[in-house]
Image (spheres, rainbow, N blue to C red):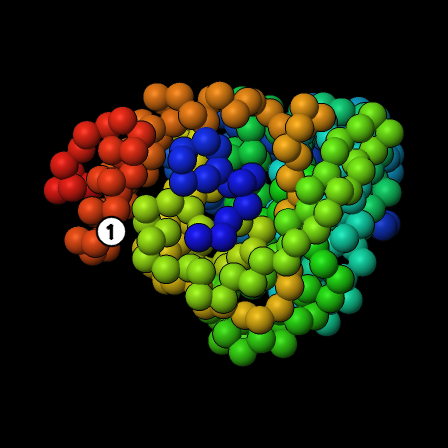
Amino acid sequence: MLIPTKTRNAKIRKTLISSSKPRRISVILRSRQHTAPGSLARGLLRPGGVRGTIDTAELEIRSAPSSTMARSAQPGLCRRDTMHLQTYFSVIVPTHKRPMLLRRALQSIRSQSAPTGLEIIVVSDAADADTDAVCAELLTSADIYARRNGQPGPSASRNLGLSLAKGRHVLLLDDDDAWHPGLLEQLHAQAPVRQGDPVYANCTVVKERRLPQGPEQMGEVLLNLAGQLTEDVYVKNQIHMSCFAFPRALLQGIMFDTFMRAYEDWDFLLSVFDRQMPVHVPIVGSRVFEVDDDTSDRRGSSQSAIDFNAVLDYLYVYRRHPAPSEAVRQKRAELMRICGISVSSDML
């Protein structure tokens, strides 16, 4: 199956700022339990140190004339209301201290000629002045820049993004990936999208080196993913997360598992597929950037994806998402056997 190595392979390796400024919020995550997206963020820290509440219907946010979170603002609350009634696409971008790569991702989104409303939701899991500067430059009043506390990692950041999203369709983009020009315009024209179905598009995989002065691209290959999403996705992942566009209604109650060491993207996707399988649309969507040498700035290491804990995570996914057929059960058992684990297919 064609799948970028970034999503790990079959061998088991792998915030309302007034004016034109983005709305900035700092979120205090009070609970790490598995809850619905609308209740994930229990508290909102507004400028001046006052906590308010946050849910999927309304945000109480103190407007701030400053481009930095630390600077105080005059009292006043703003609502997310009519400006979001026409939002068609929400894109969620989790980030962690990678401002140069985040700039590339946001520029690729900002350059889209979207025929309908678009909101960008950037969620950072760490305080970083350079990330603040990139968001202040590239986000607008229709967007959200949230900075949360708690355990670092993309899962909790994506969950917060999902709880804030107001678009009819949701897309997820890693901070080190990007979109091809015209993606949103082409997506909006697709019949399945207009009908409210989940879809996935083709992508390109870009090999690059990440040097101090910036990334250096080595080559780019197109992946035609037509027909590549099959029931074998219940054996191992097949399609990169950035290739999908989901109706937001379909995602209600689904969250990324913040306790998984690996494969949380795949686990999330299977939760969606359990409800409805996406259909392929013949457009080129994302650019998935991969680094194969020691210039990689990915968190963690490849070793963490090939040790016994990774096998346990695979088994965890299997137990959460029963095989849809006997053939899939047999393929799961064979994959575990290759990894040195003997498991009866009736347990998979």
Q: Residue at x 75, y 31 (%)?
A: 210
Determine whether 157 is above or below 250 in the image. Answer: above
Q: Position of residue 244 (x, y in %)?
A: 53, 57
Classify mark 1: helix, strand or loop: helix
Name the residue nearer the viewer: 9 or 272: 9
Residue 303 vs residue 44: left or right? left
Residue 7: in sight, yes or no? Answer: yes
Residue 274 is situated, as x and y percent measured from the top left of the image, at 32, 55
Q: Above or below — where is 133 with respect to 129?
A: below
- Residue at screen point 24% across, 33% down: 337
Q: Is residue 315 above or below residue 79?
A: above
**Residue 23 in view of the camera:** no
Counting from the top left corner in percent of width and height, residue 84 is at 66, 60
Q: Which is nearer the eye, 206 or 97? A: 206
**Residue 235 left/right relative to 149:** left
Residue 174: x %, y % from top left: 63, 42
Query: On the picture, is 20 further left or further right than 202?
Result: right
Where residue 49 sits, quadrant-wise, is top right
Q: In which quadrant of the rendered image does the C terminus lie?
A: top left
Q: Which residue is mark 1?
A: 328
Q: Residue at x 69, y 42 (%)?
A: 207
At 55% from the left and 45% from the top, the residue drawn is 4
Location of residue 151 with respect to 92 vertically, above or below: above
Instruction: Name the kind of residue labelled 1 in the image.
Output: Val
Between 343 and 313, the one lying in front of the other is 343
